[in-house]
Amino acid sequence: MQKNRLSVWTWLFLGFLLLFFSVFLFYPVFFMVKGAFGPGKEFTLKYFGLVLSSPLLREAVINSLLLAGITTILTTLLTLPMAHVMTRYDFRGKSILNSLLLVPMIMPPFVGAIGIRQILAKFGSLNLTLMKLGILAPDHPINWLAEGGFWGVVLLQVLGLYPILFLNLSASMANVDPTLREAAQNMGANGWKIFRTVTLPLILPGYFAGAIIVFIWSFTDLGTPLVFGFSRLVPVQIFDAITELNTNPVGYALVVFVLVLTVVLFVISKHLLASKRYESMARGHATGGSVTVRGKKALFLWLGVGGVVLLAVSPHLAVVIQSLAQKWFFTALPTEWTVGYYKEVTQYGLTA
């Protein structure tokens, strides 16, 4: 039996891949790990000790873990009902709504941070609107971005990362055998019990895979905290350390910490849950997979899911409005508009 031999072009392509990953993946990781254990030929663990002993770095690690954890929990609470609605019900315009739900994936969260500061500032659009309606006293504005912008970062990350978890949950729910729900219903289980005892265990591997991505992405996000000026986070501390005049090896130690955390979470998701995928479609035709709704119920679903989409894109809409605002001071919306800033962008180059 003749063995398949690789052609010259295949060997060249494999060599190119090896070279590419060596230059852009393996070497940077090796460089960071080497720097974390000491410059030159010296080997030391003192930089990891500095991470543990420094109050600032300990606070940064705790804040990053809290940020990632809260973002993951809130993203779960937001996407779980939406995934259930979009996989369980059929209604007019569902495909359009499905596409709109993924719009935040193409919008960088740190850009939306500029808009959210305009909306949620002490005298931003939201507070000024509430004052105009008589709901909020002018001398007691709500500080929506309290704690140095922590909750602003959480909000932006939830609105920017929910499509990732939504896609994982939707795929998992769509693959659940509908006859299993029917069997539980025939045995007298109600809707909540069916979800808790049948649907949830089956979608858990898919959920965990998406939640890990959200957690790591939130933990390592740099742009959004920088825009909010919230510096006591691991990514910002790494950025500050490696951009110093003399690179601080503590930054490399923090990078190694993030790499270890990422690998640990990947191993957990891969071997404890992702390898045990129970959801599957039934053989042959199975009814009861989705329910067609019309009228008021369909309108209610549109308003609920559409409201999430509108909330997710509102920070970016605020940025667009800011780019067109000639005068915007102590009002919910600009009082004068202009396109002059766009003309300046096209007419003048950057100056040193």
Image (spheres, rainbow, N blue to C red):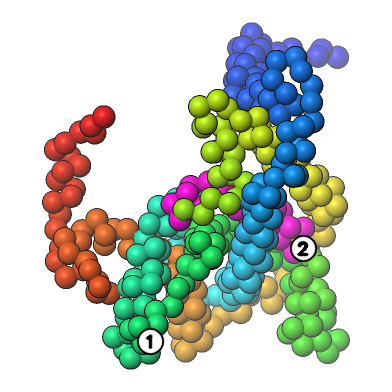
Image mark for residue 136:
1
**282 displayed left or right of 135:** right
Q: Which residues are magenta?
A: 203-228
On screen, residue 203 versus residue 308, left or right, reads right
Does the segment drawn in magenta span residue 215? Answer: yes
The kind of secondary structure element at disc 2 is helix
| Disc 1: CA contacts within 10 A as few (<14), some (14-19) or many (>=20) | some
Residue 248 percent location from the top left of the image:
61, 30
Tell me, for residue 218, which label it has, or none: none
Residue 322 in the image: state x and y as whole percent. Answer: 26, 60
Which secondary structure, mark 1?
loop
Q: The residue under label 2 is which amino acid type?
A: Leu
Closest to the observer, 282 or 185? 185
Q: Which residue is mark 2?
A: 204
Q: Marks 2 and 1, Cα distance to the nearest angstrom?
A: 42 Å
Q: Residue at x 38, y 72 (%)?
A: 122
- Name the residue rendered at 41%, 57% in the picture: 112
Residue 97 appears in the rendering? no
Q: Is residue 68 magenta?
A: no
